[in-house]
Amino acid sequence: MNDATTVGSLRLAWTVARVDLLRLFKSRDYWGPLLIVGMVFFVAIPAVALMTVTRIEASPLLMQVGEVLDGLTTRLDDRTQALPAQGRTAFALAVFLLAPIAVVVPLTVSSAVGAQSIVGERERGTGEFLAHSPLTVGQIYLGKLLASLIPGYLATLGGFGLYSLVVNVMAGDTVGRWFFPTPGWWALVLWVLPPFLAIAVAIIVRLSAKVRSTAAAQQVASLVSLPVIIIAYGIAGGAVLDPTRAAVFIGAIAWVGAAYALIRGRRAFQRDVLLGLGDEG
Amino acid sequence: MPAISLDRVSKTFGPKLAVDELSLEVGEGSVAVLLGPNGAGKTTTVRLITGALRPDTGTIRVAGFDASAEGGEVRKRCGVVPPKPAMYDRLTGRENLRFAADVFRTGRTRIEATAEKFGIAHALDDKVGGYSTGMRTRLALTRAFLHDPEILLLDEPTAGLDPESARTVLSLIMRLATEGRTVVLCTHLLHEAEGVADLVAMMAAGQVRIMGSPDELAARFIGTPRVVIDVAEPHNLNGFTKMNGFEVEADNGRGRMTLRLESLELIPDIVDRLVASGARVRRVEPLGATLEDVYFEAQRQTRAWTGE
């Protein structure tokens, strides 16, 4: 395939993704609740947690968190180690305990979109147009993947920005500087998270092509995304704890896994899955 | 070279044989009507023609391309209106058409003119979710026509429409047919095929049971042509019925008769004879067999042959 063909092919895949994104953008009943969930996770919970911690002078909780952080001394820089218990607790909450939210939110968003990506076309009958179009199955598959990945990743980036603002505003004084995002967080969001998202979406889109209703697809998607969330949750913790090695290593493995999942998903995807159910007359 | 050619094509879905050894040729610029009840295999045939489905056996060539191996080339040349013309309801008609234009790489300049042609231009900026079934069908026709396809595949395009909308859609289809495009129209409504079809293929259980032009089928299954005559003075018809070459099928005794002729060539002789006998002829109307006549007669005869 020459460059012009590749660009043309990507453009057609983007055409498929763009119409799905436009539909999503116009579906307030879909993104409205997600927006609220995102605000709760990225703004409300961190704000309340950090406000509580920064206003408590001394408590058993702060002491316990301080002890945990003592065990992580090799992974904390000198300035953070030198902080009082309150500052170290605020730092720990912001950097370690709330980190996995960055994994949960995009996976939730993307799996919801991905679950109905193919079976939704089939249920509505709109897949018929795609099936009879000159688009290749690869272009349709890539378009559907992008349409599922982009909302989740955008939610992450938006949430990441908001979260950064919230934790710096709420705990910046206590920690003594604008400390967030840390290098581990950059690695998590830019290197570790995308492949995990791709793995989950590749599996979910593939399942969406197999099931017979959107409701079934949603159920299967939650079953798939749950273990991926748990795995990613654990890895996210590791990535932010040890940004230099864990993130790079785990991210690299995840990228290989994502490539494998995407290739397998593409091979399993056939044009006829877009055609209406029960219309074989 | 035929525009569409299916050679011994079969397709199964699990245990169900949807299309069974189907062979069909549709000439370039002609209108083929696939007639048959629901489940006859019409929709599957359309899907096979565009390469959206691959046949289990047999070969399909469309506009010179193999539908299985060169499906992209085939689909570029086809415009399809599916049985349920589904669109993205949350988008406007224009947004739906832009998507189609981008997918077929035709550019968006034809949208307005094509929508005008199908009478939907006024609603292009409304959300499709608010369209009536008739408007959806018009939009689906616009979308199918947007890339100026050589071949139109219309699968029950009037399904769910009220009679007025159905008539409008049919007249649009007839207009397309006169533009020299190859059209395949699937329907189970016989009157839709009337006057449009160059070729009629009657399908049942995935097979073409009977195929031919409407005239051929009429000659084959209905046989002798008929003519209605209406004269002002019926008493002058005495002796006329003794003429050779026809038989009286019906006579209302007030000057109106339906005759079965050996040949339509006899009509001038009949008129001469009527005039010679002093009758004032008000009407002489040959009755072509309707597709409905043909369909039910063919079905009756087929049952008689196969013992179904």
Image (cartoon, coloured by chain):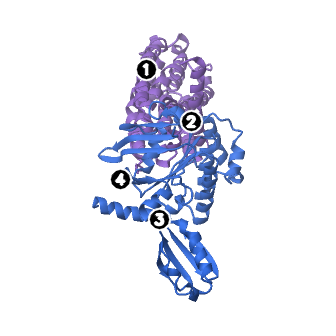
**Would you place residue A11 above or below residue B273 in this image?**
above
**Would you place residue A100 above or below residue B201 in this image?**
above
Q: Residue at x 64, y 79 (%)?
A: B282
Callout 3: residue from which chain?
A: B
Same chain shared by disc 4 and disc 1: no
The residue at which mark 4 appears reads as B205
Nearer to me, A81 or B236? B236
Mark in the foreground, 3 or 2: 3
Q: Tell me, by letter, which chain the rendering colours blue.
A: B
Callout 2: residue from which chain?
A: B
Question: Which amino acid, mark 1?
Answer: Ala
Chain A: what color? Answer: purple
Is tag 3's residue or tag 2's residue first in the polypeptide sequence? 2
Callout 1: residue from which chain?
A: A
Secondary structure under the numbered disc 3 in the rendered image: helix
- Separation (CA) of disc 3 from disc 2: 35 Å
Residue A254's disc number: 1
Question: How many discs appear?
Answer: 4
Question: Which amino acid, mark 3?
Answer: Glu
The residue at which mark 3 appears reads as B292
Nearer to me, B210 or A116? B210
Q: Quadrant of the C terminus of chain B?
A: bottom left
Mark in the foreground, 3 or 4: 3
Same chain shared by disc 3 and disc 2: yes
